[in-house]
């Protein structure tokens, strides 16, 4: 990977300030004159002209907020950066004139990379709070702590940490050809790299080899890690890899894939340049797009 490969949702400008999250620290940050916060409602972001609407946290006083209340994302230089999720749509829209609520998927096509990374971290954390309100050890209601980056169970004192689920996503290569597939629910003609969750007890390499075998019945070797992407839908870490095919006859697992094909580098180059319509390429903000691009640039 080249150092300037743009990976959407990565590259947040934040110091996560893991050691500055006592209640005293958080109160100081929340009331600092330069503190900033942006708003969400049901997983959507309050934006104006395609940018997050930043305001002082005091502007949300009196609004109905979802757990965990103001969420401290970290320090952007010396600026404390918060976010919060409002429970009422009208209260969210009232925060700014001319604002709109947009999904992260819609924003990902054009939002500034720095803002996209902040929004991705916010979305992953709120999604985790929403789905982990109750202690997985004893079932009691857990409480957010440390500014919303962990939860604690007051009944059994178990600490809970946000989940990040590792996924391998791989470009399968055979000389100057690569294998791309399409999921059963995807738009007709859309092809991308194969992917799958890493299972407990597996290395990334083992997960890569197993997934390709399961989905396309191709044996691969020499998995090479290239780069990764935090994927906030809701909390995956996509581990981008290249691997080499030992055989090329595709047998599909039709539960996983509607189709898979070998494409020549020439064809893929044409599709990415917009001069060939052999398939619909994965969107630029996906790691699949960046993996294919890295292969074309080799
Ligand atoms: Zn508990």
Image (spheres, rainbow, N blue to C red):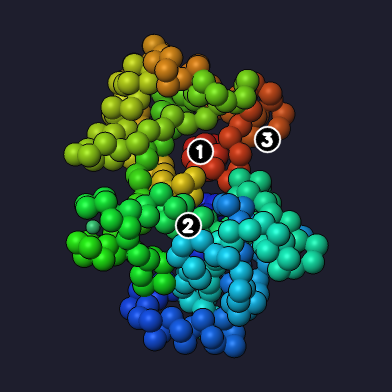
Q: Which residue is mark 2?
A: 126
Is any atom of residue 3 visible in this view?
Answer: no
x%, y% of residue 210? 28, 27
Q: Quadrant of residue 68?
A: bottom left
x%, y% of residue 121? 48, 59
Is any atom of residue 19 visible in this view?
Answer: yes
- Residue occupying image coordinates x 41% and y 36%: 169
Between the C-alphas of marks 3 and 2, the distance is 37 Å
Q: Is residue 86 left or right of residue 172?
A: right
Q: Which residue is mark 1?
A: 288
Bin the neighbour count of mark 2 within 10 Å (Cα to Cα): few under 14, some 14-19, many 20 and up: many
- Residue occupying image coordinates x 23% and y 63%: 155
- Indicate the secondary structure of the residue bearing disc 3: helix
- Indicate the secondary structure of the residue bearing disc 1: helix
Bin the neighbour count of mark 3 within 10 Å (Cα to Cα): few under 14, some 14-19, many 20 and up: few
Q: Is residue 205 left or right of residue 192?
A: left
Between the C-alphas of marks 1 and 2, the distance is 25 Å
Q: Is residue 202 left or right of residue 193?
A: left
Tell us which disc is closer to us: 3 or 2. 2
- Residue occupying image coordinates x 61% and y 64%: 39
Q: Which mark is residue 54?
A: none
x%, y% of residue 98? 80, 62
Mark 1 or mark 3, earlier in chain: 3
Report if the CB atoms under discs 1 and 2 are less than 8 Å apart: no
Tell us which disc is closer to us: 1 or 2. 2
Q: Quadrant of residue 254?
A: top left
Mark 3 or mark 2, earlier in chain: 2
**Which image quadrant shows ligand 1?**
bottom left
Q: Which residue is mark 3?
A: 273
Asked if residue 207 is positioned above or below residue 92 in the image, the reply reads: above
């Amino acid at each position: 990977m080249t150092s300037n490969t743009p990976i959407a949702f990565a590259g947040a400008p934040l110091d996560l300030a893991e050691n500055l999250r006592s209640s005293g620290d958080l109160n100081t940050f929340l009331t600092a004159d330069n503190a900033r916060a942006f708003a969400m409602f049901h997983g959507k972001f309050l934006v104006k002209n395609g940018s997050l609407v930043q305001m002082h946290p005091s502007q949300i006083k009196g609004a109905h907020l979802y757990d965990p209340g103001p969420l401290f994302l970290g320090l952007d230089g010396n600026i404390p950066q918060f976010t919060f999720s409002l429970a009422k749509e009208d209260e969210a829209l009232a925060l700014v004139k001319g604002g709109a609520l947009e999904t992260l998927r819609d924003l990902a096509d054009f939002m500034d990379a720095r803002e996209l990374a902040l929004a991705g971290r916010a979305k992953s954390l709120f999604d985790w709070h929403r789905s982990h309100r109750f202690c997985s050890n004893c079932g009691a209601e857990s409480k957010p702590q440390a500014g919303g980056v962990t939860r604690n169970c007051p009944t059994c004192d178990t600490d809970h940490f946000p989940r990040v689920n590792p996924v391998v996503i791989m470009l399968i290569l055979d000389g100057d050809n690569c294998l791309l597939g399409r999921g059963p629910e995807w738009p007709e003609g859309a092809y991308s790299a194969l992917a799958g969750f890493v299972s407990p007890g597996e290395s990334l390499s083992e997960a890569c080899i197993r997934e390709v075998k399961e989905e396309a019945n191709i044996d691969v070797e020499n998995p090479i890690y290239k780069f990764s992407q935090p994927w906030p839908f809701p909390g995956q870490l996509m581990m981008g890899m290249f691997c080499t095919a030992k055989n090329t006859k595709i047998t599909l697992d039709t539960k996983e894939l509607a189709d898979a094909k070998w494409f020549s580098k020439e064809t893929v180059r044409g599709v990415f340049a917009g001069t060939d319509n052999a398939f619909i390429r994965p969107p630029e903000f996906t790691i699949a797009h960046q993996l294919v691009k890295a292969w074309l640039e080799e």
